Amino acid sequence: AQTVTQSQPEMSVQEAETVTLSCTYDTSESDYYLFWYKQPPSRQMILVIRQEAYKQQNATENRFSVNFQKAAKSFSLKISDSQLGDAAMYFCAFHKITGNQFYFGTGTSLTVIP
Amino acid sequence: EPEVTQTPSHQVTQMGQEVILRCVPISNHLYFYWYRQILGQKVEFLVSFYNNEISEKSEIFDDQFSVERPDGSNFTLKIRSTKLEDSAMYFCARTGLAGGPSYEQYFGPGTRLTVT
């Protein structure tokens, strides 16, 4: 079975600063995908970034980047130059190569302080 | 990518009643998914649906739940006899146009179900 753990229920960051959200996972799979989803107050789930486990290079999307440590089974999200619109719940998620479902963590609530 | 529409946005029902939640994707989408998020908890997979059949389901998806795509367009989740613990946000998701990998899932805005 796959499990995803987010050990930080809440985080806060000053506007324009950088924050890192932690995620660890457990799997016996050798290849898989990892994701960060953002859920603003509207409750819509929005894809932030995706990482393929076979790629050594960390994924980057504008101000969002990940630190993927496969051996440690760690997948953290770094948000640079934080903006007020980044305030949301952030979920880390795992997806096997085969199969259909996502496995989500419990989420980290990010507050951006003006 | 076109978004997924879900109706209603909020449903209030009494315990024991049947509810039907609807997802309106683009007609040529093949894979659909339902997820549930109890308030303050993580998003949990319920079921995946491909070519008018359930392809995978979780332990949560018991006999109280069913899915179908009756008119070839709307994808529905039915809860036969709701319980208080069914109160949650229910998200529909789809893969990209014309199938696509299941890890590329696009979520709808969700339906908030409140069981009283």
Image: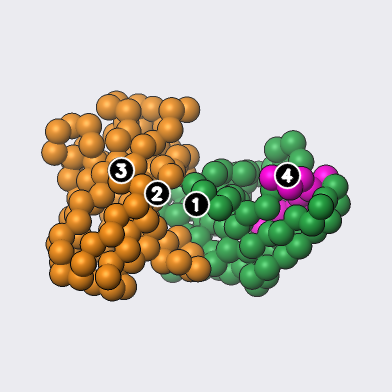
Chain colours: A green, B orange
Residue at which label 2 appears? B110
Describe the element under mark 1 as helix, strand or loop: loop
Residue A114 belongs to magenta span = no
Disc 1, disc 2: CB below 8 Å?
A: yes
| Residue drawn at (43%, 33%) of the image | B3
Q: Is residue A85 visible?
A: yes
Amino acid on which the number 1 mark rests in the picture: Arg
The quadrant holding residue B5 is top left
- Amino acid type of the residue tagged 3 in the rendering: Thr
Q: Which residue was labeled with disc 4?
A: A64
**Is-magenta flag for residue A83?**
yes
Amino acid found under the numbered disc labelled 4: Phe
Q: Chain of mark 2?
A: B
The x, y position of residue A50, in whole percent, is 60, 44
Q: Quadrant of the C terminus of chain B?
A: bottom left
Task: Decide if residue A57 is in sight here.
Answer: no
Towards the viewer: A101 or A90: A90
* Cα separation between marks 4 and 2: 25 Å
Q: In percent of the image, x 45 and y 55: which residue is there?
A: A102
Residue range corresponding to the magenta coloring: A75-85
Residue at label 3?
Answer: B7
* Category of crowding for the residue at label 3, using alpha-carbon neighbours closer than 10 angstroms: few (below 14), some (14–19), many (at least 20): some
Q: Assess whether mark 1 and mark 3 are in contact (beta carbons under 8 angstroms).
A: no
Q: Chain of mark 1?
A: A
The alpha-carbon separation of the residues under discs 4 and 1 comes to: 20 Å
Question: Is disc 1 surrounded by few (<14), some (14 to 19) or many (20+) residues within 10 Å?
Answer: some
- Residue at 42% x, 62% y is B37
User: Is residue B21 found left or right of A37 in the rendered image?
Assistant: left
* Three-letter amino acid code of the residue under disc 2: Gly
